[in-house]
Structure formats: structure tokens, C-alpha cells
Image (cartoon, grey):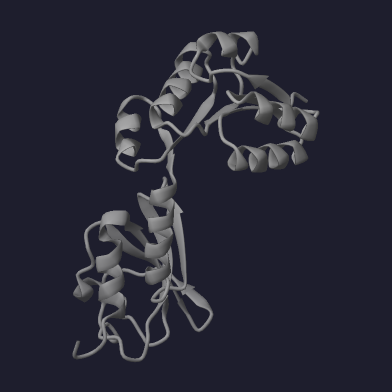
Amino acid sequence: MRKQRIIIVGGRKKARFLIKSFLQNQIDVTVINDTAQFCEELAEDFPSATVACGDGTKPYIFEDLNIESSDFLIALMPSDADNLISSQIAKYQFNVKKVYCTVNNPINVEIFKKLGISNVISSTHIVSSMIEQLVILQKIDNYIPIETGQVGIFEITISSNSEVISKSISEINLPKQSIIGCIIRHGQSIIPKGDTILMLNDKCVVLVNECDKQETINLLTKGKGV
């Protein structure tokens, strides 16, 4: 069985962490870095990895390493522009199957996607999303993002103070892009319809579009008289 092959371009601590993790999972790792001393350290610390010292924005280094049709490339260089160039070369010139491009400036996420690099990772976006979810999770039991967060599934329990108790689902006027797909009541699952009445301690499993998530949560958790 062929090993998966991952190309890591740039990075220091992040690169080290990924190299160690990938090698432990029996993945073929190739590292490209423009700092000679760091490359020497990596070669010594990870003898089973292929380490090349060079500019990860130059096609010739990819050609020398025969990265054609590799499984993944992860661009970790400090310059967003360099990461974009490296990602585009890997995707379009060397047919790498999946490319991940990191950015420091979150504004570049949508720009890079428009330029053909769909897997763009912004640490700023990740942290802000985590903070947002921590706030939301105070009201809901679980949240599972789907399609990079565009859609989500969450569970929410109807509390004693909720104004939706004894109301039918059609009376609640949920946003158009949200739906209660299942209700868990006394350990039994119910597939609800518009005339299904919500009761105290019902656990609702909700499918929702990201743009309507907060409004849906507010409707299902709003207290009486609020």
C-alpha cells in the first residue's frame, strides 16, 4: 500500500509539530525550508523525512523533489504572498491533490479562495470562531459544524423558563434556513412536524445555516417576559 506524501513548505515550530505527527502516522514527509541551519536540524532530528533547503516559491525545487501528484502540500511561510505562490504552483503545475495555505492577514482568506486556493487557514479566524462558539455553547449542548462552518447541527434543551413551551413549531417562526429535525423526549425520538408541540426538557436537534444560527438559538432559549 502506497504511503501518503505530504509536502511542508516553511514554518518552524508548526513545521516541527506536523513533521513529528505525520511521521508517527507512517506518512511520507518532504520539507522545504529556506534556512540552512534549520534544515540541518530537521534532517538530524527527523532522519526519515526528506529535507530540502530552498525557496518554496520556485518551481524548480518542486521539480527536483518530484512532488508531482503528491497527496498534500501545507504552506507555512511567514509571507501570505509566498504561501499563495507556493500553493498555486503545487496545485496547478504539479497537480498536488490537496493544498492548504496559511495566512496571517484574515482579509486574504476570501481573496485566496477567489484565486483558486480553497483550503485557506487563518489562525485569527480560528481563534475568533472558538471564542464565538464558547459563548454560544453556554446555551446549547453540542455544536457540529458542517461544510467549513456554513451549516451546523446543534442540540438544545427547552428549559423551564423558555417561552416556546406549549407552542407548536409553526408558531415559533424559526428562520427559513433552520429546522428542528428531531426531538428527544423522555428517551424517545420524535420526528416533528409543524403542529408538534414543544415541551419542558425536550432536547431539540436543530439543523441551521450559519447566518441564522444565533437567531435560532435566541428563539429557543428566550425566557418568558424577556
166 left or right, relative to 119: left
Q: Nearer the viewer, residue 44 or 225?
A: 44
Please give the count of numbered marks on the rendered protein: 0
Q: Is residue 164 visible?
A: yes
- Which residue is drawn at the image coordinates 30% and 76% (left, top)? 220
Quadrant location, the N terminus: top right
Q: Position of residue 194 (x, y in %)?
A: 26, 70
Q: Position of residue 50 (x, y in %)?
A: 72, 23
Quadrant location, the C terminus: bottom left
Q: Position of residue 88 (x, y in %)?
A: 43, 20
Q: Dividing the picture into quarters, in which one does residue 117 lie?
A: top left
Q: Nearer the viewer, residue 115 or 214?
A: 115
Vertical relation: 78 (above or below) 209: above
Q: Nearer the viewer, residue 204 or 61?
A: 61
- Which residue is drawn at the image coordinates 26% and 56% (left, top)? 211
- Which residue is drawn at the image coordinates 46% and 73% (left, top)? 141
Q: Dividing the picture into quarters, in which one does residue 201 lie?
A: bottom left
Q: Dividing the picture into quarters, in which one does residue 180 lie?
A: bottom left
Q: Position of residue 160 (x, y in %)?
A: 36, 91
- Which residue is drawn at the image coordinates 26% and 81% (left, top)? 222
